[in-house]
């Protein structure tokens, strides 16, 4: 069992680096180098389009790679559990168990990397509120994913487990909505007029 879990995590991490393709803040090629004009209070710095300015920011930027896994795994766990309840085929039960345990494991580094990145980013106004709520929702999602995974392993698929899984599904979506608001702007889900 442990060999399979370690092998699965290694495969997952290798795909993380191969397929990481975040383009939330694309920079045009002609804007790849920006010079900041020095003032008395500000030294001259040259920023290479989107390049991290510190090791903390670089490590924290891996949050944007890791965050997709807990979101997708929790959503697919809910779908697999629904399919298992509907069709009663063991493959859906095995898939749900694997994905929930994987989501609980990956939620920990995702939350930690998000905390690290939050110390390097500066938001004001409404986006500062988004950061605060996103941070606590993300921490809650990681903790709750671990609790739900232990609940499933310990007590099986009870009504309480299904209720907690639905709450986890809602919590991860709220967290993702707040994260999207920080990346794309607070009104990113409003329909066009």
Image (spheres, helix red, strand yellow):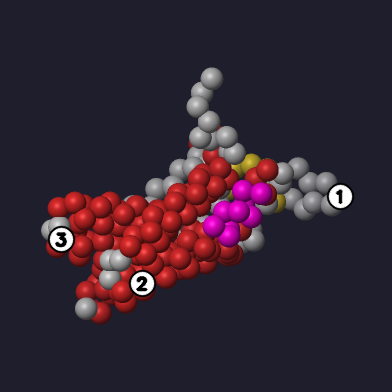
Q: Quadrant of residue 60?
A: bottom right
Q: Main secondary structure of the magenta part?
A: helix
Q: Earlier in the sequence, mark 2 or mark 3?
A: 3
Residue closer to the observer: 39 or 161: 161
Name the residue at the front extreme. Answer: 159
**Residue positioned 41% across, 65% down in the render:** 145
**Furthest-right residue in this view:** 40
Q: Which residues are magenta?
A: 129-137
Q: Residue at x 14, y 62 (%)?
A: 90
| Secondary structure category for the residue under label 3 | helix
In this rendering, position of residue 139 left or right of residue 100: right
Which callout, 1 or 2, points at the residue further toward the start of the chain? 1
Most extreme residue toward the top, as rendered? Answer: 193
Measure the alpha-carbon separation of dots 1 and 2.
59 Å
Q: Residues within 10 Å of mark 3 (few under 14, many from 20)?
A: few
Seen from the viewer's position, the closer of residues 115 and 193 is: 193
User: Which residue is painted at 44% across and 51% down in the image?
Assistant: 170
> Looking at the figure, which quarter contains the C terminus?
top right
> Where does residue 119 sit, x and y in percent of width and height?
64, 61
Residue 91's disc is 3
Q: Position of residue 158 (x, y in %)?
A: 30, 66
Reading the chain from its start, which is encountered first: label 3 or label 1? 1
Q: Is residue 130 in the magenta section? A: yes
Q: Which mark is residue 19?
A: none
| Picture disc at residue 40 | 1
Q: Tell me whether the residue at label 2 lies in contact with that at label 3, contact meaning CB atoms closer than 8 angstroms.
A: no
Give how far across and how far down residue 157 sits, in percent: 28, 66
Q: Residues within 10 Å of mark 2 (few under 14, many from 20)?
A: some
């Amino acid at each position: 069992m442990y060999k399979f879990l370690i092998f699965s995590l290694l495969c997952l991490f290798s795909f993380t680096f191969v397929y990481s393709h975040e383009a939330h803040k694309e920079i045009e090629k002609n804007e790849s180098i920006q010079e900041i004009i020095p003032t008395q209070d500000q030294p001259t710095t040259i920023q290479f389009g989107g390049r991290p300015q510190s090791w903390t920011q670089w490590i924290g930027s891996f949050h944007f790679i890791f965050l997709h896994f807990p979101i997708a795994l929790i959503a697919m766990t809910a779908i697999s559990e629904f399919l298992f309840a509907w069709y009663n085929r063991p493959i859906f039960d095995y898939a749900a168990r694997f994905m929930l345990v994987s989501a609980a494991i990956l939620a920990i580094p995702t939350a930690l990397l998000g905390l690290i990145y939050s110390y390097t980013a500066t938001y004001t106004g409404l986006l500062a509120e988004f950061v605060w709520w996103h941070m606590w929702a993300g921490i809650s999602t990681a903790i709750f994913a671990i609790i739900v995974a232990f609940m499933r392993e310990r007590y099986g698929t009870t009504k309480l487990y299904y209720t907690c899984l639905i709450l986890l599904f809602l919590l991860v979506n709220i967290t993702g909505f707040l994260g999207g608001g920080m990346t794309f702007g607070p009104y990113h889900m409003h329909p066009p007029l």
